[in-house]
Image (spheres, grey):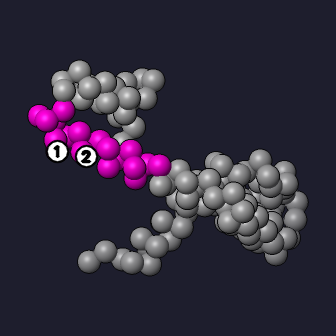
Amino acid sequence: MVDLVSTDLLEERVRYARLFDLYGPSLTERQRKAFELHQLSDWSLAEVASHLGVSRQGAFDLVQRARERLRETEALLGLARRIDALERRLQAVADLVETWPEPLPGPFARALRETLRDEEGEDLV
């Protein structure tokens, strides 16, 4: 049986990492560093506090403010939500091409598959 708490925590960490990639520059330098060390590098709050020269409570506050700022910015701009929707649509198109290759003209199907690859030739979806 999968540990749902662990799964939820992992999903939350991935979500915040994605938000940090998108909106990290909107954080203050100290928020960015505290968040990066604690959330992405898995440092304890005590380690973050020592590194930044603040109390453990100060480190906690920096991380919490960073999380809140990331959530607020996503609520305002919605880039992660839009990217997720775009990825789902791309996957749906890729699935359709694989499901219905015969009725499509060969050159069109090949061109569509090429369009769904990145610059290195790897599938986007």
Q: Mark 1 belongs to which amino acid? A: Thr
Q: Mark 2 belongs to which amino acid? A: Asp
Q: Quadrant of the C terminus?
A: top left
Residue 40, given in percent of the width and then of the height, sits at 61, 55
Q: Quadrant of the N terminus?
A: bottom left
Q: Which residues are magenta?
A: 86-104
CA separation in Å, label 1 and label 2? 6 Å
Q: Is residue 95 magenta?
A: yes
Give the camera-side residue of 41 and 8: 8
Residue 52, image quadrant: bottom right
Point 68% across, 66% down: residue: 75
Count of numbered marks: 2
Residue 118, given in percent of the width and then of the height, sits at 43, 29
Residue pointed to by mark 2 = 95
Alpha-carbon neighbours of circle 2 within 10 Å: few (<14), some, or many (≥20)?
Answer: few
Q: Is residue 55 above or below residue 37?
A: below
Assess whether mark 2 and mark 1 are in contact (beta carbons under 8 angstroms).
Answer: yes
Looking at the image, the residue that sits furthest to the top is: 107
Residue 53, given in percent of the width and then of the height, sits at 88, 60
Give the camera-side residue of 14 and 74: 74
Residue 45, given in percent of the width and then of the height, sits at 72, 68
Left or right position of 86 against 37: left
Left or right position of 95 against 119: left
Point 40% across, 50% down: residue: 89
Give the camera-side residue of 54 and 76: 76
Q: Is residue 43 visible?
A: no
Residue 99 disc label = 1
Give the camera-side residue of 38 and 66: 66
State whether the magenta stretch is mostly helix, strand or loop: helix
Q: Mark 1 falls on what kind of element?
A: helix
Residue 15 disc label = none
Q: Is residue 106 visible?
A: yes
